[in-house]
Every structure is written in structure tokens, then in C-alpha cells.
Image: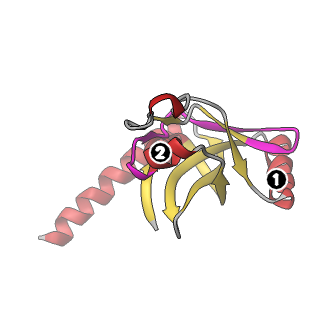
Amino acid sequence: MEIVSTNKKARFNYEIIEKIEAGISLKGTEVKSVRNKNVSIAESYASIKNDEVFLHNLHISPYEQGNRENHDPIRVRKLLLHKQEIKKLVSKIQLKGLSLVPLSIYLKKGKIKIELAVGRGKRLVDKRESLKKRAVDREIARVVKR
């Protein structure tokens, strides 16, 4: 498994409840750009419409040798999930007020996959606590290293 891009802000801004792996529907030049790691997942989010999951604001740079066959860098892309998985996600998101956040894009056995998370937004207090915890962990690691 080769990680192409990760969304570091997602783990800081959201409390991750559940993770799910999904395929992503891409065009030919998009696949080549993703393999070259020309992807930005930082501002992207997922939504569900008509029992289908779509990914918005995923920026895949145009392929350099793609000429007129190139794609729109920020187009809406369909995610590939089973119906049972989509129904489970719909029930969690609608009932509990949670959101779908992409965590990372990676290559798995030659296929491009995306890791989605069902998450609850953190409040400012929770974000401060996670910053303090990270600082304490760093300090412990320094002491142990010596």
C-alpha cells in the first residue's frame, strides 16, 4: 500500500468514529496524475445524493502530457461503495449529525482507493486538548530518547 496524499487537518478538526475504504471513479489522465502524487485532499469533503457518494473539492492537477484529453482539476467524483455500506453511512450521518471526511488517498494492488471517515466536528476546547496531548507526547519521546 502506497500512500499518495493525506488530510492532516481532518484528524485535527474531526473526532474519527469509523473508517471505510472506497474506490474512486477517475478518468485516464487523472489516474496518471494521482500516480505522480499530484493530488491535494486538504479541502475535500464527501456528500451523499440519491444513494450515491460523491467527493467534492479533490484537486487532481492536470497531467502534463495530457493535452486536450486533460480533465477539470476540481470536478465532482463518484465514490464506489456497496449499497449496504452507503445505507449504513446515510443512517449514521442523518441521525447523529456526523459528516463524511476523506482521510487519505492510496494505491492498493494497483487500484486507487480513498479512506473515508465518519466524524464529528471538534470544538475549540477539544482542539486545545489534542494540542496539549501532542506536546506532552513529544516531550516524553525526547526524554525516552536520551
Q: Which residues are magenta?
A: 35-53
Q: Is residue 102 magenta?
A: no
Q: Is residue 36 magenta?
A: yes
Disc 1, SS = helix
Q: Quadrant of the C terminus?
A: bottom left
Amino acid type assigned to the residue bearing label 2 in the image: Asn
Tag on residue 86?
1
Give above or below for 57 relative to 53: above
What residue is at 48 percent from the left and 43 percent from the top? 12
Q: Which residue is mark 2?
A: 7
Q: In the figure, is residue 118 to the left or right of 50?
A: left
Give above or below for 60 relative to 137: above
Residue 8 spot, x, y in % from top left: 44, 45
Amino acid type assigned to the residue bearing label 1 in the image: Ile
The tally of labels here is 2
Q: Residue furthest front?
A: 68
Q: Quadrant of residue 112?
A: bottom right
- Identify which residue, 26 or 82, lies in the foreground: 26
Residue 66 spot, x, y in % from top left: 45, 36
Q: In the figure, is residue 132 to the left or right of 13?
A: left
Disc 2 crowd, CA 10 A, few/some/many (<14, 14-19, 20+): some
Label located before the other in sequence (2 or 1): 2
What residue is at 37 percent from the left and 47 percent from the top? 132
Q: In the figure, is residue 91 to the left or right of 18?
A: right
